[in-house]
Amino acid sequence: MSAKELKTRDQIDQQYKWNIEAMIENESDIERDLEDVKAQAEAFAKTYAGHLAESADTLLSAYKTRDAIWRKLEHIYVYARMRRDENNAEGKYQAMADKCGTVIAAVSAFMAFLTPELLSAPDETILDYIAENDGLKEYEFAIKDTLRQKAHILTEAEENILAQMSEITGATNDIFTMLNNADLKFAAITDEDGDQVEVTHGNYIKFMENHDRNVRKAAYHAMYDSYKKLINTIATAYNYNTKTDVVGARIRKYESARAAALSGDNIPAEVYDNLVSVVNENLPTLHKYVQLRKKLLGVDKLYMYDMYVPLIELPKTVVSYQEALDIMRAGLAPLGEEYIAKMNQGIREGWIDVYENKGKTSGAYSFGSYDSYPYILLNYTDTLKDVFTIVHEMGHSMHSRYTRDAQPYIYGSHSIFTAEVASTVNESLLMQYLLNKENAPEMRKYLLNLHLEEFRTTLFRQTMFAEFEDMTHKAIENGQVLTADWMCQQYEALNAKYYGPCVESDDTIRYEWARIPHFYNAFYVYKYATGYSAATAISQKILTEGEPAAKNYIAFLKTGESDYPIELLKIAGVDMSSPEPIEKAMKTFRSLLEEFEKLV
């Protein structure tokens, strides 16, 4: 569909729009409701500040009141954001979302006393309250998790100082964001049709997937030449961003910046180390895949700009939305009749917003409040890739549905560590379903190549990023300054280690670290790799063990944030504190590569 043909929102058939009207009965009440929420938060502070730990009943009342306030505010905010995403040109919902943001900041300020005041009370007092009051049992894990981090919480005055400094300490992220998204410009290149096209963040990967090698090479150099020109500025921003992590960890008495980052989800250090260790042990398999890529592309020398182009062109297929839903139902059937029934109910209830329209937010997501449907935004274009997108987002939404049906509001969300598992399990099951039924050689080769690329970009590449982050933070902790030259050298060596001797060194990929936004949210990317490994292990269990494994997985989906991620994943039969799930994922990668080699 060209831009000229793009429909307006009111031209989209109602059956392809989400039932967002189910969230809010009357929009005219929202303004009043937001003012009520703000007033309730102010009353909360007046009622409980200085009195939080006076009794078990007071503590329980405070938690219940807090949750009720946030639950109502979250619901309005989600509605405003999703309405805005329907058409970003509609100023009404932009203003509504902005107003929600203002109220969220005010409510946060009114409730800021709660954690410091809880921690100022003796642990024994709080634990006795939990033991004597059945109502507090619901909050036991959350309260104990707060107490667990007591050693790293400062005095109220010190916490206040850090809170006031947060806008300053977050400046390096903001500086990079503005530099990366607003100021950096990339050169125009000649595309396969002979047209001059400016390289952007949005079209770069499409250029990297282009079968015209001259286009790939031109886009690659256009991208990194721009980062090279600003490399010292970016290095300075990242140096101080990393210093902020290290200093913040020291102030809070953590042994390292990594320990501080892992502490939130109570992730053992061995989870990080096992990931890096097992992936490194299996780099020869990645090198073998890269060697095969060189052979299939028929090039004398392989460069990093050859790494994303599909080795097998997708056979021409059109997959209608209804066909996509049928494929999803068949692919996810191993999860059991109840899962499929809940999913079908969600489709009928109007969870999904299907097609693109003018002004609609691009991409795809799963979103919703505790009291709403777990909605899905799509921009469906009748491709096989879109089928994987639906299945991915449905994994998130079904995770939310099961969790919200089973857990109270306080545990009704998910950590990043577990959230990506639910979506990737669905993708793995769909891939296996398609491979099992596919006999056409070209389509089978395409699917295998697609699966291998998911492993390369998610498990291998994100682990490489994790290694780089660990390296830079340890350098700062050892008193080193992160210079542009040092980081470029380290990154180039790391890239060479991961991709092997088959890839030519071109003095360009060394600048790649400078364009990765996730590096400004340290020790985050490893979760993509661990999540992918956990999902691979879980999907294999479901396919080999059948109903018992599926039931365990559904039990995991119901847990939300009621325990730490490592413990929750054990319910699904995966222990991420051991190297086994990573090793199993690597075994899958090897078997996929072996089959792909035979077919090509």
Image (tube, rainbow, N blue to C red):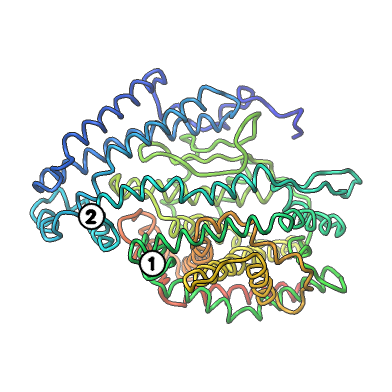
Callout 2, which amino acid? Ile
User: Is the residue marked by circle 2 packed among few (<14), some (14-19), or many (20+) residues within 10 Å?
Assistant: some
Which circle's residue, 2 or 1, is located before the other in the chain?
2
User: Is the residue marked by circle 1 packed among few (<14), some (14-19), or many (20+) residues within 10 Å?
Assistant: some
Q: Quadrant of the C terminus?
A: bottom right
Callout 1, which amino acid? Ile
Would residue 569 be visible to someone looking at this image?
Answer: no
**Where does the image place residue 250, in percent across and percent down from the top left?**
38, 65
Which residue is rendered at x = 51% and y = 22% of the image? 92
Residue 270, located in which quarter of the rendered image? bottom left
Q: Which residue is mark 1?
A: 267
**Where does the image place residue 14, in percent across and percent down from the top left?**
56, 27
Q: Residue furthest right?
A: 194
493 on left or right of 392: right
Mark 2 falls on what kind of element? helix
What is the C-alpha distance between the residues marked 2 and 1?
18 Å
Q: Which residue is mark 2?
A: 143
**Where does the image place residue 488, in percent across and percent down from the top left?**
67, 68
**Where does the image place residue 233, in percent across and percent down from the top left?**
64, 55
So how many labels did they put on this image? 2
344 on left or right of 449: left
443 on left or right of 135: right
Considering only vertical position in the picture, is 525 above or below 470?
A: above
Mark 1 falls on what kind of element? loop
- Of residue 342 and residue 105, the one placed in the foreground of this image is 105
- Of residue 24 and residue 463, the one placed in the foreground of this image is 463
Q: Quadrant of the N terminus?
A: top right
